[in-house]
Structure formats: C-alpha cells, structure tokens
Image (cartoon, rainbow, N blue to C red):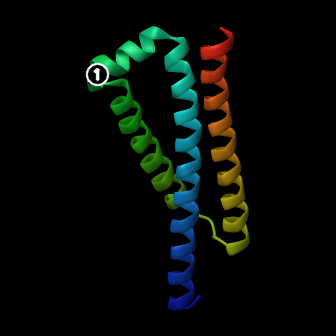
Amino acid sequence: MNLEGETSNGKLKIAESVILGSAAAVIFITAITVAADLAPPLKDWLKNTFNHHWIGKSIISVIVFVSFSVFTFVVPYKACLERINNLVLILLTLVSLGTLVIFGFFSWETFLK
C-alpha cells in the first residue's frame, strides 16, 4: 500500500472512531439521564462526586466518548467511506431516539405520573 492510501485510511479510521465514540456517548447520556432520575442514589452519587449531576454526566460522557474512540481506532481494520455513511445514519438515528426517550420520559414523569 502506498503512503497516500495509508494516510487516507488513517483519516477514515479517525472518522469512524469518532462516530462510534459519539454513538456510545449518546447511548450513555440517554441511559444515565433516565437512570439518575429513577434511582436517587445514582443522582446523589453524581452530585456528591462532581458537585452537580449534570457535571458528572458530562465528565463521564467525555470519558465514554474518548475511550470508545481510542479503542475503535486502535482495533486493526480497514476503514471505508461506505461504512462511515452507514455509521452517520446510525448515529443520527440514535440521537433522534435518545431525544425521544428523554423527552418522553420527562413528559411521562411530569404529566402522567
């Protein structure tokens, strides 16, 4: 493989890794938001550890994002543009579903509970 191909594959791997890290962070944020509201000890732990539960969720989600991004980058595979396109669609779907879950949960909690 030539140097140009290796550089191109490296850039594609970075893109894939960032998308996968973003997907993991979206799933984590959705889950921790609902879980912390349902389990007061979790919310209290976030408050006590990070001074505020939002700060705790933010710090942990950055750790999830970076961890998944680095892990998927170091796993040996050849990246491709078609997979990146599919991953972007998956990420958009996860963001949409996460938004609906959080909105639906807080709507249910506010109006129906």
Image: 22 above or below 108: below
Q: Is residue 75 visible?
A: no
Quarter of the view holding residue 75? bottom right
> What residue is drawn where x is 52% and y is 27%?
33
**Can see residue 91?**
yes
Residue 79, given in percent of the width and then of the height, sits at 63, 70
Tell me the residue that label 1 is attached to.
49
Is residue 11 rendered to the left or right of residue 94? left
| Picture mark count | 1
Q: What's the residue type where badge 1 is placed?
A: Thr
Q: In the picture shown, does residue 42 fall above or below 11?
A: above
Q: For the C terminus, which image quadrant?
A: top right
Query: Does residue 53 lie above or below 25 as drawn?
Result: above
> Could you say where residue 24 lies in the image, as x and y percent from the top left?
56, 44
The N terminus: image quadrant: bottom right
Image position, residue 94 (x, y; %): 67, 45
Residue placed most toward the observer, 88 or 54: 54
Residue plotted at (49% across, 54% down)? 69
Q: Nearer the viewer, residue 87 or 7?
A: 87
Residue 47, horizontal then vertical, whole percent: 32, 19
**Dot 1: what SS?**
helix
Identify the residue at image location x=36%, y=21%: 46
Relative side of 89 to 76, left or right: right
Mark 1, other Cα within 10 Å: few <14 / some 14–19 / many ≥20 = few
- Work out whether residue 103 or residue 8 is closer to the camera in this orientation and state it: 103
In this rendered view, identify the residue nearer to me: 36 or 79. 36
State the residue at coordinates (41%, 32%). Answer: 57
